[in-house]
Image (spheres, rainbow, N blue to C red):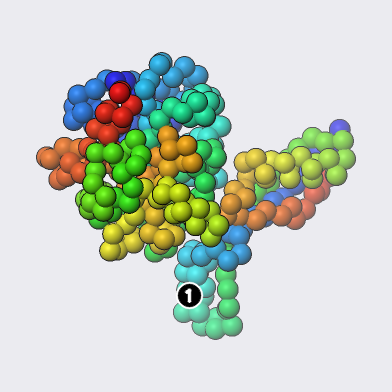
Amino acid sequence: MTRYRVSVEIRPREGILDPQGRAVADALRTLDFREVREVHVGRYVVVEVEAASPTVARDRVTAMCAKLLANPVVEDADITEVAAL
Amino acid sequence: MKFGIVVFPGSNCDADAYHAVVDALGEQAVYLWHKDHDLQDVDVVVLPGGFAYGDYLRAGAIARFSPIMRSVEQYAARGGPVLAICNGFQVACEAGLLPGALLRNAGLQFICEPVRLRVESTQTMFTADYSPGQILHIPIAHGEGRYHADATTLDRLEGEGRVVMRYDGLNPNGSARDIAGIVNDAGNVLGLMPHPERACDARLGSTDGLGIFTSLLSRVAA
């Protein structure tokens, strides 16, 4: 068994009003970053797991996303990194 | 009649619900600790407001896996009445007892103020004592009360008369179709963002919330 660090990015699902992202976008434009078009604020979760392979580690964390880490009604979750420790 | 009020770590409207049941309604209430399994033969379960488990991850996400919720889910599946208020509504959605989700208020601020609600359905065990279209003054106190569901689900809720209450006039949080409260398809689980338990005592400004408790009393006890 190897220990893996699995990183998960969770964002509001596209098309759902994201007032937090909008407020941050407005603030950035106020700071003269006029090129800003959209901002979305989500969560970044890092899970360390023991697994037989990176594929197993990824599959287990995908299951964790479906069950607890993300709410599929309103959020999208992507695993951005699986790193052996 | 006996109400069971679930207490999660971080619940803060449990005592308000107890006061509404015992002092305003004159019925029995017991607290149900989140680590217990036994619902103590209650007639109605209340999932109260607050910040269960600190609302970590998402409001209600962790509370829904507490031991008592397994019993509440089985009880609800058997038709047991569940009154899910505010954070309790969020827990009920996370648990799949109700469709949809509650998101950050459109204006981003936590809002604590009385609102106007319109009773949309009196065909439920929770609202039988109101009259159709009745306007209620009941407080809200939430930062994440914007009801969201996909258009198909919203159409179905409306078509089946399951939107029980709507915000009247001002929609405080940006909820889809002004929805403040819905029931599940069997009609025994009510999720409501406003706090009827805080509107059961004239000294606190309104008794408009009492109708939910008297409706349950006449419908469930019968």
Local crowd size for mark 1, using a 10 Å CA cut-off: few (<14), some (14–19), many (≥20): some
Q: Is A36 placed above or below B18 here? A: below
Residue at image coords 71%, 55%: A78
Whole-percent x, y for residue B12 in the image: 34, 36
Whole-percent x, y for residue A26 in the image: 48, 75
| Residue situated in front as seen by the camera: B195 or B109 | B195
Q: Is A3 placed above or below A79 here? A: above
Could you say which quadrant of the image residue B87 lies in? top left
Q: Chain of mark 1?
A: A
Q: Is B211 placed above or below B103 here? A: above
Whole-percent x, y for residue A68 in the image: 62, 41
Q: Which residue is mark 1?
A: A26
| Residue situated in front as seen by the camera: B125 or B71 | B125
Residue at image coords 41%, 16%: B40
One can see residue B69 in this view: no
Which residue extends farthest left? B203
User: Is B24 displayed left or right of A79 in the figure?
Assistant: left
